[in-house]
Amino acid sequence: MTTISLTYLYVLIFVALAFDFLNGLHDAANSIATIVSTRVLRPQYAVLWAGFFNFIAFLFFGLSVAQTMGSGIINPKIVDANVIFGALSGAIIWNVLTWLYGIPSSSSHALIGGLLGAGLAKAGPSVIIWTGFTKTISAIFISPAVGFTLALAIMFIFSWLFVRSTPVKVDNLFRSLQFVSASLYSLGHGGNDAQKTMGIIAVLLYSQGMLDGGFHVPFWVVISCQAAMGLGTLAGGWRIVHTMGSKITRLSPMQGCAAETGGAVMLFMANYLGIPVSTTHTITGAIVGVGAAKRMGAVRWNVARSIVYAWFLTMPAAASIGAMFYYLSLALG
């Protein structure tokens, strides 16, 4: 374990918070795409709404996801500043590329991929903690499937309950209910995604011997990450909002409410279990689920298929970039 200058430490923490901001920017679509596409809220008001609930998420959830991220993916004893630099570089570069092309890839798996790539570059496969890694990889397939199933089931329940109601009455009711479902989804999003950067900063501090009493997440790290996530959400991510909100399927307020509720339930479960899932995967699965509840042809499967391809590319691509920047940091000394 090598110590670094305070200046370099502060720079890395700043870069980590910049990633968290970018995560909020990139994943703003996860929180607001449905409520914007159903025209319940204008985009500028939707980001304020989502940003607030992303920020206060730390009041409702523990830090089990941050613990998994910081000490459950790779052995924290091999982590140093160069590994963190490689991990953040891999995640940020992949996030920027996918944001530029409007592809809703996973910021979470970009960060995990960057961390794995840098860790493997330093010490080989022995650094992987297989229980946490397997749990995270499994979530790539489980979270969209659960999001799909829950949203589909909720949509069927809503349709059954309001089968005799007029379309105008149903539309007005679910325009109001979407404020609740969007809030719940934003809470789940803030509770899962911000904790990943908390884990990265905490393991960096741990590697420098700056955490008394073993690995834990200091409160100032919690607040900083939640604030960066909330501010990133405020900045919006309109390219991806368009993809998520209208290109996959056209949403009614009832469908938007069902998708957000299904996604929120999945994220609440993941936060409770300490699993760093992809909020992008979850809400995409839920949106496809409500589209399929209407009819299979309502889903633009070619768009959904291109999103799935990006999912599978994210971790290896970010890992490759992370490894490259780890070696670069060694070369720069």
Image: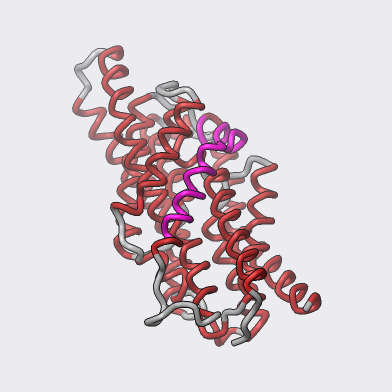
Q: In the shown orientation, is residue 64 left or right of residue 173? A: right
Which of the image's four quarters has the N terminus? bottom right
Q: In the shown orientation, is residue 290 left or right of residue 209? A: left
Magenta-colored span: 222-245
Which of the image's four quarters has the C terminus? bottom right
Q: Position of residue 270 (x, y in %)?
A: 35, 59
Which residue is at the front of the view, 76 or 290? 76
Q: In the shown orientation, is residue 309 left or right of residue 234? A: right
Residue 226 lies within the magenta run: yes
Q: Is residue 201 above or below residue 228?
A: below
Q: Position of residue 161 (x, y in %)?
A: 19, 27
Residue 209 lies within the magenta run: no
Q: How many marks?
A: 0
Q: In the shown orientation, is residue 314 left or right of residue 189? A: right
Please report the residue visible at 58 percent of the width from the left and 38 percent of the height from the top.
Answer: 237
Q: Is residue 146 above or below residue 172?
A: below
Please report the residue visible at 57 percent of the width from the left and 84 percent of the height from the top.
Answer: 78
- Residue 12: which quarter of the image? bottom right
Q: Is residue 329 above or below residue 260?
A: below
Please report the residue visible at 57 percent of the width from the left and 45 percent of the height from the top.
Answer: 26
What predominant SS class does the magenta segment belong to? helix
Q: Residue furthest right?
A: 331
Specify the color scheme. secondary structure
Which residue is at the front of the view, 175 or 230? 230
Task: Kindly tell me whether residue 305 is visible in this rendering.
Answer: no
Q: Residue furthest front?
A: 6
Q: Position of residue 94 (x, y in %)?
A: 66, 55
Task: Kindly tell me whether residue 13 is visible in this rendering.
Answer: yes
Q: Position of residue 310 (x, y in %)?
A: 61, 52
